[in-house]
């Protein structure tokens, strides 16, 4: 099939020879056609304002999009189970999918078949639960990578007056980095699996029913962040959140503990060693205090039995630690007596506190940082 020319691009509404950017647009269209983007795909991309990214988008998910009926027939899965797997992995319709369809590709069918093998090891419901965790992690990685590229690369290109063609090539070159990424991440996944196995074996409470583990759990949040963020520009807010996330990970890791998640302006961290967890909590409060910017950190911690599921921690110990962070004043670390007694830190008695969700007051101790 021959590559379309300027007349065909103009007839398709893609090119205006009298426009100021006509030469750059024609160069872009010719390049896109040369890498296999047809006129229908170009028109659809222009409608959605994605002309500069259509080549990279097609490269990310190559191949024809199948209808649900075609995908079920090729996979050999029962329709209900196919729908469960697709929902668990978080697939949504993408450009080029048949109308009203998710648009599964053959490569994605191979993935679903591999996931199906999990049911030979786990129960049906637990296999789906693990798939949802994997999908959530992959979605977060993808969101982080795309938002970083848009803010750090694409926005700068537009501000500097870069051309459509240059932007398209930049985006296309960037997504090539995805090629082979899975294989390159394999050693890191294996390392994290070994670390997780060692942690859970060392902290399990019941050698038979392995649902409960003993951990120190901490939360540190920033008082005043909500009010301050209202007056920040989007760029300033993004920069502040970046500093907060980077600082949280660096400080907690340096103390020997581990970040579980970041929830807005709050960091949750754990460690089987209460002393390491307290060191992380103290360091977070001290470091965030030194950052200034009008925010005041405070924290809460508890030590005891937790339920570990889906990479997160649950139970009354977690809830107590979170509520203690809410009850602390800026610069204070409030902890349970169980945690204080397990460390050599000089905590002061802080009376009893009624915490939301608990019927009896909790005896607490305090450490000013």
Image (cartoon, grey):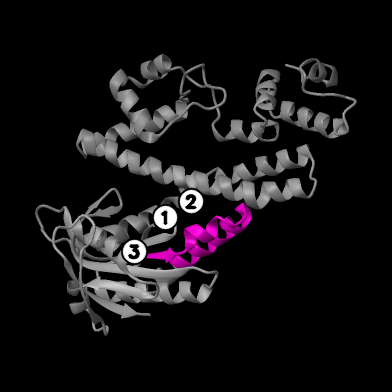
The x and y percentages for residue 174 are 63, 45
Image height of 134 relative to 76, above or below: below
For the residue pair 161 and 365, the one nearer the viewer reads as: 365
Tell me the element at label 1. helix
Q: Position of residue 154 (x, y in %)?
A: 68, 46
Q: Residues within 10 Å of mark 3 (few under 14, many from 20)?
A: many
Q: Residues within 10 Å of mark 1 (few under 14, many from 20)?
A: few
Say left or right for 356 vs 162. left
Q: Residue at x 61, y 43 (%)?
A: 176
Is 243 included in the stretch rendered in magenta? yes
Of callouts 1 and 3, the N-terminal one: 1
- Label 2 crowd bin: few (<14), some (14–19), many (20+), radius 10 Å: few
Q: Quadrant of the C terminus?
A: bottom left
Looking at the rendered structure, which numbered label has been put on residue 187? 1
Quarter occupied by residue 11: top right
- How many angstroms separate mark 2 from mark 1 (CA)? 7 Å
Name the residue rendered at 53%, 73% in the picture: 292
Q: Quadrant of the N terminus?
A: top right
Q: Are marks 2 and 1 in contact (CB under 8 Å)?
A: yes
Q: Position of residue 112 (x, y in %)?
A: 36, 30
Instruction: Decide if residue 223 is on the left or right side of residue 194.
Output: right
Q: Which residue is located at x 30 percent, y 42 percent? A: 130
Residue 109: in magenta span: no
Q: Earlier in the sequence, mark 3 or mark 2?
A: 2
Camera-nearest label, 3 or 2: 3
According to the picture, the residue beneath numbered tag 2 turns out to be 184
Question: Relative to 209, does residue 342 appear above or below in the rendering?
Answer: below
Which label lies toward us, 1 or 3? Answer: 3
Q: Which residues are magenta?
A: 220-249
Which residue is at a point 72% across and 29% down the rendered structure image? Answer: 32
- In the picture of the structure, the residue carrying the numbered disc 3 is 269
């Amino acid at each position: 099939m021959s590559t379309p020319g300027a007349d065909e691009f103009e007839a398709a509404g893609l090119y205006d020879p009298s426009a100021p950017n006509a030469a750059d647009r024609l160069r872009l269209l010719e390049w896109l056609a040369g890498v296999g983007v047809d006129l229908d795909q170009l028109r659809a991309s222009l409608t959605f304002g994605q002309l500069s990214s259509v080549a990279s988008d097609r490269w990310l998910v190559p191949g024809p999009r199948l209808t649900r009926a075609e995908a079920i027939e090729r996979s050999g899965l029962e329709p209900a189970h196919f729908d469960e797997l697709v929902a668990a992995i978080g697939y949504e319709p993408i450009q080029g999918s048949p109308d009203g369809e998710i648009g599964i590709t053959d490569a994605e069918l191979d993935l679903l078949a591999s996931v199906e093998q999990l049911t030979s090891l786990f129960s049906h419901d637990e296999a789906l639960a693990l798939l949802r965790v994997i999908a959530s992690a992959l979605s977060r990685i993808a969101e982080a990578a795309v938002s970083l590229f848009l803010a750090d690369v694409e926005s700068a290109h537009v501000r500097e007056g870069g051309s459509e063609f240059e932007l398209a090539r930049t985006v296309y070159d960037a997504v090539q980095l995805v090629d082979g990424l899975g294989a390159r991440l394999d050693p890191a996944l294996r390392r994290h699996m070994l670390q997780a196995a060692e942690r859970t074996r060392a902290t399990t409470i019941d050698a038979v029913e392995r649902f409960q583990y003993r951990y120190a759990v901490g939360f540190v949040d920033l008082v005043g962040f909500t009010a301050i963020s209202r007056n920040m520009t989007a760029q300033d807010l993004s920069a502040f959140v970046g500093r907060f996330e980077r600082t949280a990970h660096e400080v907690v890791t340096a103390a020997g503990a581990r970040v579980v998640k970041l929830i807005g302006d709050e960091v949750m961290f754990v460690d089987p060693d209460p002393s390491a967890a307290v060191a992380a909590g103290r360091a977070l409060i001290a470091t965030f205090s030194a950052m200034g910017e009008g925010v005041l950190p405070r924290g809460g911690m508890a030590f005891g039995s937790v339920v570990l599921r889906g990479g997160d921690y649950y139970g009354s110990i977690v809830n107590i630690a979170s509520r203690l962070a809410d009850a602390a004043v800026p610069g204070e670390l409030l902890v349970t007596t169980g945690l204080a007694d397990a460390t050599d830190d000089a905590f002061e008695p802080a009376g009893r506190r009624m915490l939301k969700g608990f019927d009896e007051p909790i005896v607490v101790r305090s450490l000013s940082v």
